[in-house]
Image (tube, rainbow, N blue to C red):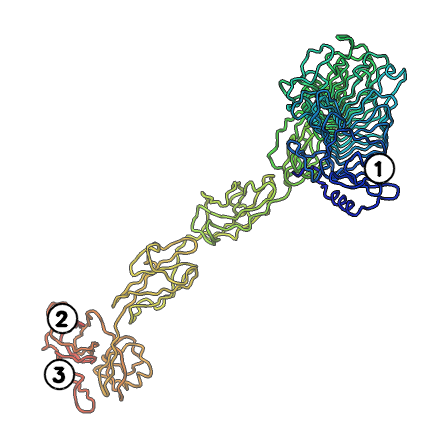
Amino acid sequence: MLLNFRPKHSALLFILLFVVAFSVRAASAVGTTNWYVSSSSTGACTTIDPYCATIQAAVTASSNGDTINVAPGNYSISTTIIINKPLTLRGATYLTNKNGYITPALYAWDSNTESIITVTNDVDAIALPAGATNVTIEGFVIQAQNRSSAGLRNLITLAQNFAYTNINIRNNVLGPNTNTALQNGTMGRAGIVMPGPNCSTTFTNSSINGNLFFDLLGDSSGLLFVCAYSPTYHGGASCNVSFSGTFFTDNEFRDINRSAIELVGNCRDLSITNNYIHNIGAQPTNTAPSFGTAPNNYTGTIYDWQKFGNGILVIRGSSDVINAGAVAPADLTISSNTIQDNEKNGIYIDAAIVSNVNIASNTISNNGAKGAPYLTWDGVRLDLNGDYHANKTECKPYPGTCDNLGGVTGITVNNNVVIGNGGKAVNVTNTPTNDLIVDATINWFGTTDRTAILAMLNGPVTGEPYYVESGMSVLGGAGGAPPTVTNNQSGDDTWLGADPGSVFDVDFTDIGGTLLNNAQYTAWTGPAKSGSQTIAWTDIATAINASSYSSNWGVNFSSLSEGTNYVSVRVFDNSGNVSLAADDVFFIKKDTTVPSAPARVDDGIGTSDIAYTNSTTALSASWPVGADAESGIARYWYAIGTSAGGTELIDWTNNGTALSVTKTGLTLNNGSTYYFSVKAENSAGNFSAVVVSNGQTVDTALTQKTNFSPENGTIITTSEATITFTTNKNADCKWSLTDQAYGEMASSCTGGGTTSQSCSISGLAVGDNSLYFACLDSAGNADPAGSTGQLSLTYNIIESYTTAIGWQFLYACPPVSAGTITALGTAKEYKNNQYVVTDLSQITSCTTVIVNPATAVPMQAIIPISDKAIAITVGWNMLFNPYNTALEYDGTHFSFKKTGSDASISLDECVNLSDYVVIGNGNGNIQYVPDDIAAIPAHTGFMLHSDAAGELTIKP
């Protein structure tokens, strides 16, 4: 199977180089040789043929400074690989950092990509005897899966009592080191060990980095270095083991029973940095309930045996504790590591004589916090009780006392994140006899509660000042509790258009006893000091020198951004303590810009602006919305005046957010014009420009109608007509044949909204007709009846015919055209000039005339539809039959009746016209005046002489 790495390097480059080299048998650089190891190699393993089948063969054949390239594959060994010369032993994945490497299930390594060294029995995998120098081991999986209970063997061993320099062990997987069938806590030991005690050993200018130490499941540690003990062990010589220039860095340690890194004795000048140490302690894969036999009659359990489950151990030698001049590690730097989720302590220092340990910039979290059946332990424990192997067993003889408690010095724990550990953050057990104070200041303990923080510290430990926020930029606690902030200003939803002055109510109190020094505020556009900073930290008050400050204070309003500004505060006491986080104690909504006014003001409420109103008690107006990008429109104001922009009628009045208004209860003058003014106000109290309507005029008069055409009384000859007339103001008009109000009429005229009206009349009856017109003006005045615009028309039927030639009677109506006058000839005067006129152009009303046309002339006769009564005078009467049928004196077509009497005029009373006048056509034919008026021809006139006044009724 393929293996996954957090740093994604591949062994492909190594494999290609190895294959090319194996095929070409390339020579190495001058003075050194590249050796190539493959389990399938048939090479001679010589400098001429540097291809070997085993790693040990290549090491044995190599010279100082050579490089041994080991191809991917599984290399099982039953004897230790001894590296006794300077060289580089390089596996397939030497470029891949194994910190974060994901191991396969059941150790199913991929032999196509990994160079795997597998130990098959109880031997060390690799040993560096006799003070090797300039040795690099890189890019391997080194494992042992079959350790025995007696086999406390390691994966890489450095011989004791030799000086090592420039040793680089990097980018390897060291593990498992266990017995996969049965593990009782004793099978297998360290990943890398330097046994001891050592007096003349040094390990300088070296590096163990980029490795993964895992599944070291016996009595095992990842790195175990046993350095010098007391002079008793070294023939009276005082010794130490120097690690000058050496770093244990960027490694991962997990699933290890004993500890990740264990330093024993006088190890000095070592830096342990940037490692990831987690899940150290009792492993669930162990089938036995204990980790071996406890020494010195120890009756505890695996859960309180401090030998197992610590992240980093710094201890005296267990057999050196009672010796005079016993020594312990010193001058150590433990920095920038992540030490978390371990069974017991994150860092355990077991000795009263450890000195100069700088624990800095680490994350030490959730150690000793696994819960039952596990016990609770500390982030950092300085154990003056000597409980490393068992309860006080280092203070021998058991159960002895620990007398040497005055040698520990120079322990600092600074700039760390120490949170979530089961017991204390920093714990010093027992009381030192010297003036030891562990400096555990400027750490983040996961809380700003001073009481809780001090409870995390035990023994002679000072933890103040400490960080009061996780960003580790603000300190508090030095010289006592930091001052506090009391927020009486829970928030301000009121938009401000101007500086409110000193109105903000946030108070400050000193509780550490050193009095307040200064208080500050800052403002940001986003919460929790996000967005843009509009005001940098600025003093509210300085040199306070009082236990509290409760005066209201202001801000630099002009520097705030338009919109919402979030204000945070802090306060310092005279010891330099700063208050706990007080972000966003209130916010300020700033809006100093004026809103945009409505685009217009319309008189009236509706879809258009009105010019007139007929109300004398109410006025209306409407407008579109204004705009304000910051605080929004809060309300609109209106005023009404008799001048544009004036307030003579109604002063400025709050209209809320409504976009229209109808003001009632007014006294308005007919003919006067009134103007609405409107302005918008935003939530900060800023006003827009004023917008004024174009005015509305009060008009209560009805519409007047004049200039009718045709005129009143006109006779027309069709049942349809177009009537035009003029109104005295813009109006919409309608017509009807019955007297109705405007709203009841159904027929509209054209010319709506103007003063020129045109109405298309239809449905006229023959005879006299009454037409009614009603209008609605733009002020809303509607005619209550059509009689306000009444017109009478007479509809008669026209009969066309042609005259005869010569003298004859005709019926003529004005005006008679000049052409017709000429064609009809000269009229003749008869009987006292009362029946004819001599000049046809002088006819002013319809009458009968006698004419003498020389040619036939087309004429028209208006035919009455109803009975027509004609007054008859005593004497001669000139009459005309307008119909196209003869009139008969039989009571059907005409009849005579005496005036003032029901008696009819008899024929005897009518004298034959021929006795007086004979009109001929040149042939002597008397055809125009019948001898018998009982039959009057169509379209002809006749003379009637009556002895009695009366009335002649002509019937159609």
Q: CA distance from mark 1 to mark 3?
A: 172 Å
Which residue matches tag 3?
Answer: 931
Q: CA distance from mark 1 to mark 2?
A: 167 Å
The reply, left or right, for residue 908 in relation to residue 83 is left
Which residue matches tag 1?
Answer: 62
Labels 1, 2: front one: 1
Q: Position of residue 66 (x, y in %)?
A: 84, 38
Looking at the image, residue 684 lies above or below residue 479: below
State the SS at label 2. strand
- Residue 405: image quadrant is top right
Which residue matches tag 2?
Answer: 897
Q: Earlier in the sequence, mark 3 or mark 2?
A: 2
State the SS at label 3. loop
Three-letter amino acid code of the residue under disc 3? Asp
Quadrant where the N terminus sits is: top right
Asked whether disc 1 touches disc 2, contact meaning CB atoms under 8 Å apart, the reply is: no
Three-letter amino acid code of the residue under disc 1? Ser
Looking at the image, residue 553 lies above or below residue 438: below
Could you tell me if residue 2 is visible in this image?
A: yes
Labels 3, 2: front one: 3
